[in-house]
Image (tube, helix red, strand yellow):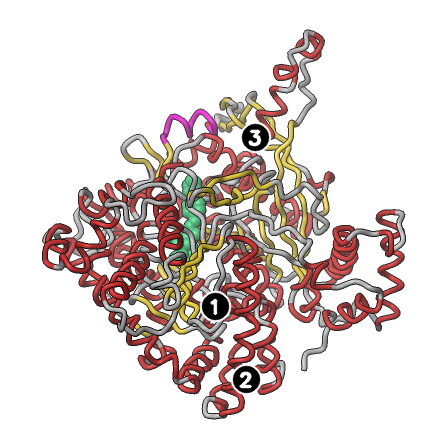
Amino acid sequence: MATYQQIFKDKKDFEEQYRAACQAELGKTFEQCSLLEQFQVLAKLVASKGNAQLPVSHTTDEKKVYYFSLEFLIGPLLDNYLINYGARDLVADAMKDMGSDLDAVCRQEVDPGLGNGGLGRLAACFLASMAHNGIAGYGNGMRYRYGLFHQDIEGGRQVETTDNWLANGFPWETRKDASAVLVRFNGHVVRHEGADGKYWFTEEGGDLVRAVPYDVPIIGYAGKVVNKLRLWSAEPASEDFDLDAFNDGDYAKANKFRSDVEAISTILYPNDAGEHGRLLRLKQEYLFVSAGLQTILRTYEKQYGPKWEDLGKHVCVHTNDTHPAMCGPELMRILVDEKGVDFDLAFKIAHETVSFTNHTVMPEALEKWPINTFRNLLPRLYMFIEEIDRRWRDGLSEKLAEGANWNDVLRNTAILWDGQVRMANLSIIFSHSVNGVSALHSDILKRETFHDFAQMEPGLFNNKTNGVTHRRFLREANPSYSKIITEAIGEGWLNDADELKKLEAFESDASFLSSMDEAKKVNKERLAAYVKETSGIVLDTNMVFDVQVKRFHAYKRQLLSVFKVLDLRNRILDDPNFEIQPTAFIFSGKAAQSYTFAKEVIRLINSLADVVNNDFRVNEKIRVAFVPNFAVSNAQYIYSAADISEQISLAGTEASGTSNMKLMMNGALTLGTLDGSNVEISELVGPENIKIFGMKTEEVEELQRSGRYYAWDMYNNDRGRTGRIVDQLTDGTLANLSGNFESVHDHLMVENDPYLVMADFHSYVRAWEELTAGYSDRAAWNKSALHNTANAGFFSSDRTIAEYTADIWHI
Ligand code: 26Q
């Protein structure tokens, strides 16, 4: 039993504080507050408890970790923080007495979309686990005025609308004007020379932007440790208001400087390859890097004085992908230009302080910037990059591994190449640790993506398999299952996810296994109600819930799922006696606004849903639903209701995946390829508790190398099933809602099926049939589901953070 930091003595104490807060915040009685106002006041009250804890959370000489990420997908916080304080039951009870309903109040909270998907949610899970593990770990990111777009579905198509998440204010944040800093863009470099021949540089002119921080408390489990997430907003440094233009009625011109500056923190960029090279993105990257580092050095200097050589002993700067890659050179710039440190020492300090996580192996996703753009925007920073690149080239022959070719290695490892600044190489050269996010992915990084770096310095590379916070994705997402888990093994698992292992003792406990059915039923009903409300589709909760929820991307192969569902439909129509386990296929996820193919796959799924759900000949056996606007909040409904977790990316393409972990925790069985962390799930649960299919990474590599994959052969050799599905993309079968799918057809047949959907199709359908055949033996199925939960402790981000702490941050 954890001892919680008590924030309310008892119900009476809570009620008094809450009523007083209503008066103080809004000048209203509790009874006069709307549900939204009840939420706002309660959130402010809980935030104030967190903020009061913050200063006593750490001793001053503790090593600090700053986690730099352009994305933090934090999700709603109120429910989570009440659970962490151990106050949820008390507050729910008191609210009921007061005539309100805590669940309804929690549903008022916005779900800030300050991230795209996996990488952003990982950063949020890491904040939660750093606080849980007691580390002084702080997030550093951007406060976007608009988060990731809101997704509506019209005529089956994704339609994007702005996410005005701040419309009702954000009660968790505190604006810190006193901590604002200045960041310069487009200046010019001036060289100075002293009488002794020594020279130095300053940067002058250009535009000064004021970066203003907003802090959000991160309340750890049990409430003992509170950390903070600092999000930066861009504002004009001076009031450069054009009064003449205003008086002429040209308000746009009058406000131009202000709006140009504010644009920097206006939107979050989507994660598709087509969005590369936007100047505003580069400004975002520099703004939060520079503002964060200036603050870190200010804090450090106050505490330790100008002992810069010790920075790496007290401070870690962790960079989430290459988006904060400028951390290394910016740290050098401040040390050299503003603190008078010499160049070599400044590089050593930066190198000791900075570490880097890579999240992708897709070559087209590796970030690059045109040198000219970069140099114009950040001329002084560029000088540091150029000099480090020069020294890298200079020292290359000494570092070269046995048998390596100097020219090849230079081409692969230099920072500057082909008129571009290559951010991955920049990150690697400035970091003392580079890690991938699953065992397989880290292996591919060493073997392929960053092969030459790994040859030169094998010790630089390491693996940190991702994790997720089980307190949000199991305890909070799945109250019914959590309840029976706690009744069985106590609540120690909330603190230590490895205790879930104790559930193995219940794998043959008939009464526990049947109580799992009841727990799942509640969740399926909750999801079915949500699906009905948001898409109009009716789900039968007696069906298997087969779930694929994640960003839409060709490599994740939602198209392969479509092939399977269409194939089942075709076979049911051909043979009315064809028996399958009745299944609801549930999809959710966003496609980047400009990613045409991914958006067509969304339309395809909705068209398939329209065809299947309205056909009485098949809709008792299969049903399809697309849940609009996938986000942290509705994800929690979906994970807890799932029976099957679809993780079917082409082997070697998904760095890790994290929905696989969230679904596994909730007792869903994985149907997947040996990709990303599916490999580790499979090792942990054993072959009888997961269904693996499809080509392995080496087979994919071999097939692609050989150049002997022909989409038309797949079509011609299996006209009855594969060929028929390909034809149905354009023959009107699916056209009722909004037309045929020529571009999807061409992706397969003209672009030669780049992610080998047709190659894995038969193996996939067979695996699905074998897996679902086991569903009717409820005890056996639940035993397997429980075994998945029991072994999910490894995928708690508490474990991941413990590994970063020991191996990378050395705390
Ligand atoms: C880059 C440049 C310009 C604009 C946008 C971007 C950009 C933004 C976001 C590029 C990539 C992302 C997000 C990547 C991401 O979410 N990757 C996922 O990270 C997860 C956590 O490690 C992994 O589990 C997934 O496998 C990986 O796809």
Q: Quadrant of residue 256?
A: top right
Residue named by callout 3: 263
Q: Quadrant of residue 178?
A: top right
SS label for mark 1 = loop
Closer to the eye: label 2 or 3: 2
Within-10-Å neighbours for mark 2: few <14, some 14–19, many 20+: some
Residue named by callout 1: 540
Q: Sequence-wise, which precedes: disc 1 or disc 2?
A: 2
Disc 1 residue type? Asp
540 relative to 450 in the view: left or right: right
- Residue range in magenta is 370-378
Q: Sequence-wise, which precedes: disc 3 or disc 1?
A: 3
Q: CA distance from mark 3 to mark 1?
A: 46 Å
Q: Is residue 376 magenta?
A: yes
Disc 3 residue type? Ala
Residue named by callout 2: 515
Closer to the eye: label 3 or 1: 1
Magenta stretch: helix, strand or loop mostly? helix
Q: Is residue 64 magenta?
A: no
Residue 777, placed above or below residue 155: below
